[in-house]
Image (cartoon, helix red, strand yellow):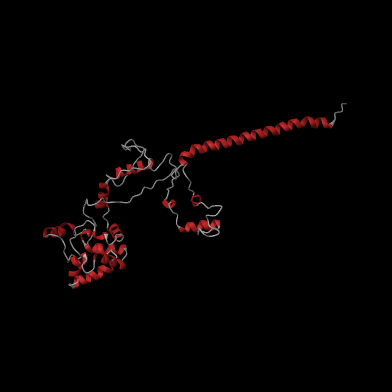
Amino acid sequence: MRVQPRGLSLASSLPNEHRHRHGLAILGAIYIGLSTASCIWYLSLLNPSFANDIWWAKYSPSGTQALVVDLFNTRLVTQGTGSLDILAPVATMDKTYETAVATTDIYPTYVRRLLLSELTSLEFAVINLRSLSASWSVFMCSQYCWVDLTRQFEVAHTADRQQRCYDRYHANGAVYLETVLRNQVWADFISTNGGDDGGFTVAIQNWLDQLPAGQTWLKTTSTARDTTNVDQEVAYWRARNISLFQLQWQNRGQTGISESLVIQNALGHTWTSVSMYWLFVNDMGVMVNVNRSLIRSANNSFLMSPFVEMESMLGLQDSN
């Protein structure tokens, strides 16, 4: 029988256990290193798409955005609806987009076509007439045929022109002075164009004041803006057989229009102009969340350390 000290067996097992733990530590370190490296590599792949809010690699205002605007503007010159494949061979522009400032092409004929052939609905006319200032209301390019929608007071420059009004233009609301004046703030219009020697007073109002029908028309027209909404005004026009509002072609000035493109990102979401200003209600919400005051001079102002970054609350960051 052999007798072996207990301490000898324990001592021989310790190096094996130590080597096992050391190996696990090395494998763990390798795993963490590879995971970190793969994350960094993956983020580097996503970085071109992360550089802008619509997840479009290499998208820039002076480059891709200007090209997209040019492609749409070119197509809109000849058609108002349809699809456009920006990756198709025909989706090209004979220009470079290398400057720091976007240079998109504008086609004045496109705006004129829209205004004179498509944007002629009564709803569109009423809404925009109500946003027109008193001073600009007399600068619209339209040769008026009548003062009133009942065609009692003729204003065409010649007899032949007046006859053409009856033959061709009677359904066009733009040839009636009433359609414009009913949608003006009357006090502003009179202060701008009325008065003892004002253009409207001399050219129109003085004679109407002498006739009962004219007095009634002035009273009704001067209060129309305050007593009707857009739908009621449109119904009023239609009841008098007005079907469109079409201005006359002109080249006194370039016609302007405001349009926008809605671009979806790779996730199917659109980006919004709320990033320009997200409204006061969101300012208040952020201040509640961080228990800060929006008043710059307050002792708990959002400007005090630690500084509250509004951009980070909205998820914005610099592209570089």
Query: Front-most of 239 and 273?
Result: 273
Q: Outermost residue toward the front?
A: 297
* Residue lying at 46% horizontally and 39% vertically, measured from the top left: 48
* Residue lying at 67% horizontally and 35% vertically, measured from the top left: 25
**Residue 218 in view here:** yes
Quarter of the figure with residue 32: top right
Q: Is residue 51 above or below residue 283?
A: above
Instruction: Tell me: 142 left or right of 318.
Output: left
Q: Position of residue 311 (x, y in %)?
A: 48, 50
Instruction: Tell me: 157 left or right of 275.
Output: left
Location of the N terminus (image quadrant): top right
How many circles with numbers are drawn on the protein?
0
Q: Is residue 68 above or below residue 8?
A: below
**Residue 244 in view here:** no
Query: Front-most of 291 and 257?
Result: 291
Instruction: Tell me: 158 left or right of 72.
Output: left
Q: Position of residue 26 (x, y in %)?
A: 65, 33
Q: Outermost residue toward the left?
A: 159
Quarter of the figure with residue 85: top left
Q: Position of residue 29 (x, y in %)?
A: 63, 35
Q: Outermost residue toward the right?
A: 1
* Residue lying at 55% horizontally and 56% vertically, measured from the top left: 290
